[in-house]
Amino acid sequence: MRLVEKLSRKYRIRLLLGLMLIGLVILVACKGPEEKPSKTDVSGEASGSVESTVNGSIQTTIIGGRTGGAWSVFTEGIAESIRRDNNNSLVTVEPGGIVENPLTVGTGKIPYGLSYAMTGYAAYSGDEPYDQAYEDIRAISVVIPSNYYQFIVRADMEYNSLDAMMENQAPLRLAVDQKGSAGEKITRSILQGYGVTYEDIISWGGSVDHLGGAKTFELMSDKRVDATGDAVSVPSSDIIEASTTLDLQILSIDEKIIQAVSEDLGMVPGTIEAGSYEFLEEDVDTVNTPAILIVHKDVPEEEVYQVTKAIHGNLDYLGTVHEEFKNLTVESMINVGNVPLHPGAKKYFEDQGLVH
């Protein structure tokens, strides 16, 4: 009898284990294979380039400016806005450059990037400094409405206006950014308005060097550079820092030159107000261009819609990231210049009644 009970007990245990095993198999079969998120490039193959929304979150990369510069701050602010509005999103920020970013986005290596409107359109249309048209670039939104061209000279310069420098053929030691960058193109266009070339400046006993901001101000401190020009936010951290050890001036641009440059480069007139820097005692007339967020055309419409919505929905937050974001409004977001809007951004602005 005990043997029968013992066998019966073993049988019941084995039966229970068997039923549990069958149930587990059925559960796994019903669940199906686990889907892993994949990244898709412009050709549809798995890669780290044009990335898309996965399970309602956004996994992507934005290329911005050099580490520690204002553009890196702007880019991180945009990235955080996307994270705030899209749960479990992974938005990575990578350093970049004004000229490089449209090329990187236009070839699908990184899906999003910051660009000046004028630089983005130069890449889209194949104008200088680009040797071909990158027609896959699309615009999403303005992020910084105004980046003002600032022609900065040492305060001890003999001439305190561009008109006087050009008229007297001053031996100007000029520093500009890399050829084809926004600041360099604007500087060259301003000189062209006076009928002057870099070669003319050199023939007058001056010099023209292509240098970054930090090196430029270092050489200005050593009195080996007299002037520099670039399109940057106001106030610019580089200029503020340089002004702690240098006496600087920002020169106004002649009204006729402003008009010519605006027509040449697709810019608009602007004014840097007195007091924007401690050393700036009078308003400065100049030109400006917005910084915009660009994207590859193959990024999904729904994702770009959500990115545009995140920027609009976090304007108050962005104002705490950098002073320049305080000038961004939903109305100014759409003033992206001549780069075509991505359908996702256009759809969002249509829903807001801003475009038709």
Image (cartoon, rainbow, N blue to C red):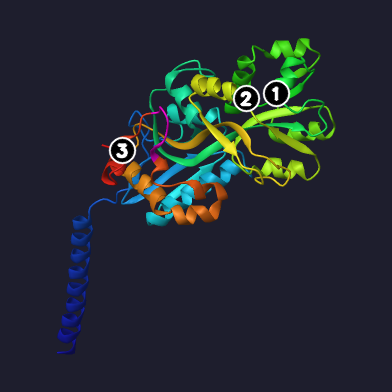
Q: Which of 141 and 164 is in front in this view?
A: 164
The residue lying toward the viewer, choosing from 222 and 5, is 222
**Helix, strand or loop for disc 3:** helix
Residue at (61% x, 33% y) in the render: 285
Q: Can residue 239 be seen in this view?
A: yes
Image quadrant occupied by the N terminus: bottom left
Tell us which disc is closer to us: 3 or 2: 2
Q: Name the residue under label 3.
A: 346
Q: Is disc 2 placed on a helix, strand or loop?
A: loop
Asked whether the residues under the numbered discs 2 and 1 touch, taking CB atoms below 8 Å apart as contact, a structural biologist would say: yes
Residue 172 location, x and y as percent?
77, 20
Instruction: Give the secondary structure at mark 1.
Output: helix
Label 3 packing within 10 angstroms: few (<14), some (14-19), many (20+)? many
Residue annotated with mark 1: 162
- Spot the residue most to the bottom: 1
Mark 2 surroundings within 10 Å by alpha-carbon count, few (fewer than 14), some (14 through 19), many (20 or more): some
Q: How many labels does the image show?
A: 3
> Horizontally, is 44 left or right of 188 in the view?
left
* Corner quadrant of residue 88: bottom left
Sequence-first disc among 1 and 3: 1
**CA gap, disc 1 and disc 3:** 42 Å
> According to the image, label 2 marks what residue?
254
Q: What residue type is labelled 3?
A: Lys
Q: Which amino acid does label 1 sit on?
A: Leu
Location of the C terminus (image quadrant): top left
Asked if residue 314 lies left or right of residue 280, the reply is left
Q: Which mark is residue 8?
A: none
Tag nearer the camera, 1 or 3 = 1
Q: State the extent of the magenta-drawn residues as a range.
A: 334-339
